[in-house]
Structures are given as structure tokens and as C-alpha cells.
Amino acid sequence: MHHIQKYLLDATEFYYHYHDCQKEMRALAESIESYFDQALKIVADSPAEAVYWGANFDDMITYPAFFEREIVPWIRKASDYLSAHGKFEFCHCDGENLGLMDLIRDSAMHVAEAITPYPMTKVKIEEYYQRWSDTLTLFGCIPECLLLEETATDEDLEAYLDHLFKAVAPGRRLILGIADSTPPKAVFDRLIRIGERVEKEGRLPLQGGAVPLLSGSQLTSAVAPVTPQLFEDETFKVILEDVLKGKHVDIKRHAQEILDRGVNAQDILQRGMISAMELISERFKCGDVFIPEVLLSARAMDEALLVLEPYLTSEKEEVIGKILVGTVHGDMHDIGKNMVITMLRGVGFEIQDMGVNVPTERIVEQVSEYQPDIVGLSALLTTTMPEMKKVIDLLKTRGLRGSVRVMVGGAPVSQSWADDIGADGYSENALTAVQAAKDLLAK
């Protein structure tokens, strides 16, 4: 009897395998292609009038290069086949689509479903509508965060709807819905209010008048990168390049070679590795690199830290501070959290990682036992953001709030949300978390 061992990869591990083992990953993809062909034939022969084909397209997870190379060909193949059988192809595009706007528009899918615009993502509803509605039907467009008392007021919802009806005029190729889904704690009266306004104002063609978009030159100017200067000393250039290119094997050898020449480990860290991550941060902010590239760079940095750690321990007088980090209850995402941990450890913080889906009670217990200077809370889902406030409230109840600073972050989290729940600090992304943590300790 043959024993088959199954491996489940999380997103981080998948990116590593996809980068390191391209031949093997390609062979695996080709080996299961026939199953997708069979599935396509089955749904095409079914009575269904519309077919979901592909889900969770997001420029952080299915980043542009991967999406164009691996996913678009299948979307087009399915679209052609389903069209020939008189069916529509739906694709689930519920995440951050900024880097995928043109690729999704030109992919040949018929309906982009669960579109989630600003304020939950970076792309505003008017940009979605003006760039996609000539070729795509838009489905969704009402962010689920507007249904929660914790993340929006009634006035916020009304203001969004006022803007929506103007932004999507004349309203062709549009199916309004809650994106991604209606959360369990949604205010039901707000759903009723949306229905009332659609019934009153939603007759086509809409008369509100489109909201003007920024011109191409204005958009280019707005995202123009501010590139930090690369360190010019040849001593650290090879380390910097290793981090930028994600060379996690080479960097260990290079770090040891530089140490053997008598170079200070702290200088290697600061002037080679941290300088590279600062550059990655700027490229990430302006959309030149995406999560997988950042993860590869972070992995290289982790590997180099294993070499530098004994030297850093002997060189530094004490740990900068202790930080407890975890993703809140109900949320299984860990990419951002893991990058934060890498960056914080790299500059001398002692980190305890609680993992993902951490119950509020456990976080507070860990604060009591570990006695950190900072507790960092991460959330990627709007529906789990209220868990952050629960942690803060329970810390107060247990008499621990005064002994620890609370820092929050994650894709849907903002400075205003941090202020509203009484957090001490906020970081926009993993690459700014170091300064945010240092600022908290300095207060």
C-alpha cells in the first residue's frame, strides 16, 4: 500500500515554494490541470446560468505578476468555454485590487463580484466604475464595514451612499451588494436603509453625474516614490542586494564573511539589512513590489539574523523592549504579523509570538505572565477589528492597562480606529512598525 503524505501550505510557505521550487510547482500544476478541465466541462453542461470560477483575487495574495502568469489564462479559458455554452463567468475580487485593475479588466471575466472599495481598500468606487464598467459588470461596491457600529456611524453610511449614486452614474453594469458579506453583527436597520435608498434613487440611468477621476499625470505624481539613498559602502552592498533579492541562502555566507573581516554586527544589521528593508518599504508603498517580494526579503533578513545574533547579543547592552504579538480572535491571517516580528527582532526587540486566532482571554493572560512593554494586535478582517477593543477593555478590567502599551495594525485598521478604541499606537504596515514601537517606548 502506498502512503501519501499531505502537506498544507499557508500563504507564506506557498510563496517560498513558488520562488524556490518553480520546476516542481509547475509540474504539480500541470498534473492537476485535467481535473480543472473536467470541472469546467461539468459546470458548462449543468443547468446553471452563471458559474463562479476563481476567488479571492487580491494584489497582496495573487500579486500582479502571479495573477497575470498563473490565473488570467484560466479565467480566459473558462470565459471562452462558458460563453460558448451560454453562461456567465463570475470571479470573486473582494480584496485590494489596486495592482490588478487593468489585469482584471482585460481578463475576459464577465462579472467581478464582491468588489470592496475605499474605505476598506485603496481604490475608490468611482475609479472602479470608470475603469471597469465598459467591459465588466461590477457586483458589490458597499463595504461591509459600513454596517458595523464599531467601524462606521449612520452618517458615514449616508455619506457613502450619497457619493456612490453620483460616482456610478449612469449605473450600467452594476449590481449593488454588501462586499464581501454581511457581517453577523451588522446593524439591520442599515440594510433596510440601503434598500430604501436604492429603491428611491436607483432607477437607471442614474442622474447624479459621475465624480471626476484624477488624470493619469496626477495619479503618477501622487504615487511617485521617494527612494532612499542606497548605502554606497561596498562592505554592505552585497548584504543589501541579498535582502532586496530575497537571497536567503547566500546572505548567511556573506554575513559571516563580513563578520570574519572584523565588521561590527550592528553595522551589518543597520547599514545593510535595515537599509534594504527601508527601500523595500518605499517600493511597497508606491506599488512597485508586493507582499511576496517583501516576504522573500524578510526571510533573507531572518536567515542573516541567525548568523548575526550571537554577535549582536555581545554587542548590545540590553534588549530594547519586550513585545507580545498576535492576530486577534476569529482571524487566521499571519503574513503581516510575521513581517512585523521579523522587523522588530532585527532591531533588538524581544518578541513573543502568540500566533493567529488568539482569544481575548489568552492575550490578557499572556500580558500578565510575559509582562511586555507593548502588545501588538493584528487584524485583516473588518469583522475581527472589534476584538482589539475587547482586549483593551479586558486589560482595563484586570488592572493591566496601565502597565502595557497597545499597538494595532492590519489592512482595514486606521489611525482613527486606533484612536476610537483607545490604542496607544498604530502602524500602517509591517515596515513602519519599528518606528511606531520605538515611539511608544519613548513616551
Image (cartoon, rainbow, N blue to C red):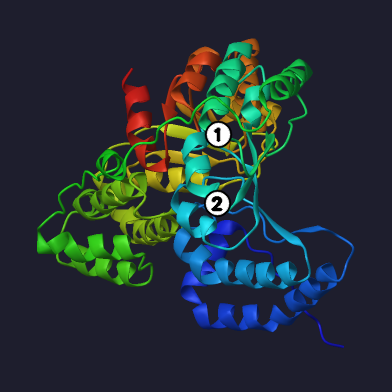
Whole-percent x and y of residue 413?
Answer: 52, 30
Which mark, residue 168? Answer: 1
Residue type for callout 2: Asp
Q: In this view, does 12 lie above or below 317?
A: below
Picture quarter containing residue 232?
bottom left
Which residue occupies the extreme left position in the image?
A: 233
**Label 2 crowd (10 A; few <14 / some 14-19 / many >=20):** some
Whole-percent x and y of residue 274?
Answer: 27, 49
In this image, 319 relative to 292: left or right? left
Q: Is residue 415 above or below residue 398?
A: below
Q: Which residue is drawn at 31% across and 50% down?
A: 283
In this image, 175 relative to 327: left or right? right
Q: Residue at x 58, y 58 (%)?
A: 11
Picture quarter containing residue 42?
bottom right
Count of numbered tags: 2
Residue type for callout 1: Val
Which mark, residue 48? Answer: none
Q: What element carries label 1?
A: loop
Where does label 2 land, which residue? 58
Quarter of the image with the C terminus is top left
Q: Is mark 2 on a helix, strand or loop?
A: loop
Say whether marks 2 and 1 touch (CB < 8 Å). no
Which residue occupies the extreme bottom position in the image?
A: 1
Q: How far apart are marks 2 and 1 (CA)?
A: 22 Å
Asked if one can make out residue 92 in the rendered structure from this viewpoint, the answer is yes
In this image, 413 relative to 93: left or right? left
